[in-house]
Image (cartoon, rainbow, N blue to C red):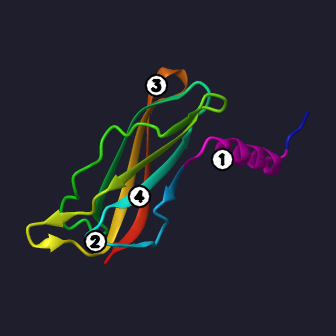
Amino acid sequence: MKVSTATFATLFTVAASAFAQTVISPTPGQVLSASEPFNLTYFSQRYFEESSIKISVVTAPADGSFPGGAPVLDLAPTSHSPVDSSAIYSTMVSPITLYNGPQTGNHTVYVIETYNAYGGLPGIDVLAVPVTFV
């Protein structure tokens, strides 16, 4: 059977999207309060031979001018499906606050997931969501 390049690319895209990691909240470009915690919701679906090890969240100024806020480490899933190995993680994240008060402007929220990849090798996914604190 001959498979065209276009067909292969389509099948690969469908297969890859079936096991996607997605930040549900906040959304890219969302405006958030610099003085109030915000909800972070993350969806993770791993290939059947993969498993999540640890999920961490950190915020940092978009320009990288100084280290980001204290990370949220070792998120536990708030829901889990044994059928398709998906999990939803949800937590409240506090924005960066320094001695002179909340930091406003463009920031990036990073979600870092380390996992056991197919074949037992370690893997890491980093998702970045640009937001604005006011």
- What is the spatial separation of the Cα atoms under label 2 and label 1, in whole angstroms? 33 Å
Q: Quadrant of residue 109?
A: bottom left
Marks 1/4: CA–CA distance: 24 Å
Q: Residue at x 46, y 38 (%)?
A: 77
State the mark number for residue 17: 1
Question: Would residue 105 be counted in the magenta stretch?
Answer: no
**Do labels 2 and 1 touch, CB within 8 Å?**
no
Quadrant into which the C terminus falls: bottom left
Residue 38: percent from the left, percent from the top?
Answer: 37, 62
Q: Nearer the viewer, mark 1 or mark 4?
A: 4
Q: Could you say which quadrant of the image residue 50 lies in? A: top right
Mark 4 or mark 1, which is nearer the start of the sequence? 1
Crowding around mark 4 (Cα neighbors within 10 Å: few <14, some 14 to 19, many 20+) is some
The residue wearing badge 2 is 34
Question: Mark 4: which secondary structure?
Answer: strand
Relative to the observer, which residue lies in front, 11 or 92? 92
Location of mark 4 (residue): 39
Main secondary structure type of the part rendered in magenta: helix
Q: Nearer the viewer, mark 3 or mark 2?
A: 2
Dot 3 amino acid type: Leu
Magenta-colored span: 4-21
Q: Could you tell me the amino acid type at mark 1?
A: Ser
Q: How far is disc 4 from disc 2 in space, using C-alphas?
A: 13 Å
Helix, strand or loop under label 2: loop
Please, what secondary structure does the residue beneath circle 1 have? helix
Residue of label 3: 121
Residue 23 position (above or below residue 31):
above
